[in-house]
Image (cartoon, grey):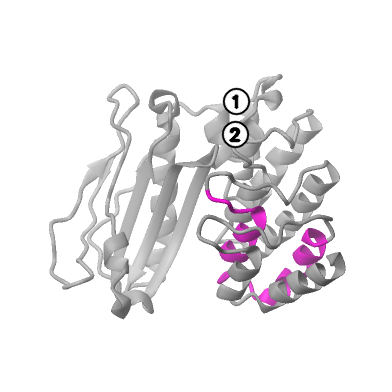
């Protein structure tokens, strides 16, 4: 389950030793894989304009428990995968499958970018012991049903996990199934995290049109069932609106977001001027990400509430 990846330091472009790591079985205990940490290098302004990123983070109780990201700076490729759940043994299979998903996505990306310098990607096998949670997160509706047992719809984390699935159609079918079975949308992950956070953060890069349509429908479902867009992540001070304006900034033209904005801004008492821990309001985030239509919606909403 190992793979190799060559890379260069951004600051001086000198080739350094490739990091080669593995995601082991839960019995071996080592299920964290760090391929590269390039935060320091990203501060080099000369390279920022060439920077492309695919990023995914999963939060539980406001704490990131899993993240993967792939970056392109100039013609060099960088990958980083981090996995740090509270209970590593019980979640090991998700870590393995996460890496497999990451490599599949980046293999597809690299096929479209033949000039990028990379050594080799060796794909990991899918998890040999999937659970209902790993299938809710990474699987299809059919593989999810194979692991689902009656009563699990009431478990606090399962519906949230389904909202993190990156395949829009599979995510939609799993969520609708759980809701029909009686799952509650009001069970928060803790510290203010609700289902709008993963809904606005987990976007399909392969099927954007379907993803936006499904996000639109699920947003309606959550509001109709009493979930609130005014929930605040107590660790970051962010609301779902922060996610909405930052996550979609590059993937969708602002004008295509109008149907979603119409639903979002139909909710009374949105916290549009609440500052996160960086001092930014949703209005600030919308402006910084070029969401001109989003800015207009916020300003008009604010005027109606005065």
The count of marks equals: 2
Drawn side of residue 102 relative to residue 209, left or right: left
- Provide the major secondary structure of the magenta segment: helix
Disc marking residue 143:
2
| Circles 2 and 1 in contact, beta carbons < 8 Å | yes
The residue carrying pointer 2 sits among few (fewer than 14), some (14 to 19) or many (20 or more) residues within 10 Å by Cα, namely some
Q: Which residues are magenta?
A: 236-265
Outermost residue on the front side: it is 306
Question: Vertically, is 6 above or below 23?
Answer: below
Q: Which residue appears at 27% of the width and 62% of the height?
A: 40
Q: Would you identify the image quadrant in which residue 259 lies?
A: bottom right
Return the residue nearer the eye: 84 or 268. 268
Instruction: Estimate the x, y position of residue 65 in percent, counting from the top left.
Output: 45, 39
* Residue bearing mark 1: 147
**Quadrant for the N terminus in the image:** top left
Q: Would you identify the image quadrant in which residue 171 lies?
A: top right
Q: Which residue appears at 45% of the width and 61% of the height?
A: 54
Q: Which residue appears at 35% of the width and 25% of the height?
A: 26
Is 272 in the magenta? no
Instruction: Estimate the x, y position of residue 46 in percent, counting from the top left.
Output: 29, 80
> Mark 2: which secondary structure?
helix
Is 257 in the magenta? yes
């Amino acid at each position: 389950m190992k793979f190799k990846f060559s890379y260069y330091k951004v600051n001086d472009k000198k080739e350094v030793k490739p990091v080669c790591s593995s995601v082991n079985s839960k019995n071996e205990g080592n299920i964290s894989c760090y391929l590269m940490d390039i935060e320091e290098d990203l501060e080099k302004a000369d390279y920022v304009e060439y920077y492309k990123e695919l990023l995914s983070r999963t939060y539980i109780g406001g704490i990131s428990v899993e993240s993967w990201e792939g970056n392109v700076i100039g013609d060099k490729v960088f990958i980083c995968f981090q996995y740090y759940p509270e209970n590593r043994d019980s979640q090991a299979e998700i870590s393995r499958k996460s890496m497999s998903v990451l490599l599949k996505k980046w293999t597809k990306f690299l096929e479209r970018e033949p000039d990028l310098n990379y050594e080799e990607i060796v794909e990991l096998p899918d998890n040999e012991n999937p659970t209902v949670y790993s299938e809710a997160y990474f699987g299809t509706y059919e593989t999810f049903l194979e692991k689902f047992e009656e009563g699990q719809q009431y478990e606090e984390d399962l519906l949230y996990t389904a909202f993190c699935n990156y395949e829009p159609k599979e995510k939609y079918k799993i969520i609708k199934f759980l809701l029909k079975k009686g799952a509650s949308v009001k069970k928060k992950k803790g510290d203010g995290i609700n289902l709008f956070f993963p809904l606005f953060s987990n976007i399909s890069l392969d099927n954007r049109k379907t993803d936006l349509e499904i996000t639109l429908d699920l947003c309606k479902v959550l509001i109709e069932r009493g979930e609130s867009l005014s929930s605040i992540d107590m660790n970051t001070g962010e609301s779902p609106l922060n996610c909405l304006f930052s996550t979609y900034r590059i993937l969708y033209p602002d004008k295509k977001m109008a149907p979603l904005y119409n639903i979002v801004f139909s909710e009374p008492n949105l916290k549009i001027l609440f500052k996160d821990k960086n001092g930014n309001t949703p209005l600030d985030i919308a402006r910084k990400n070029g969401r001109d239509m989003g800015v207009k919606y916020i300003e008009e909403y604010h005027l109606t509430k005065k």
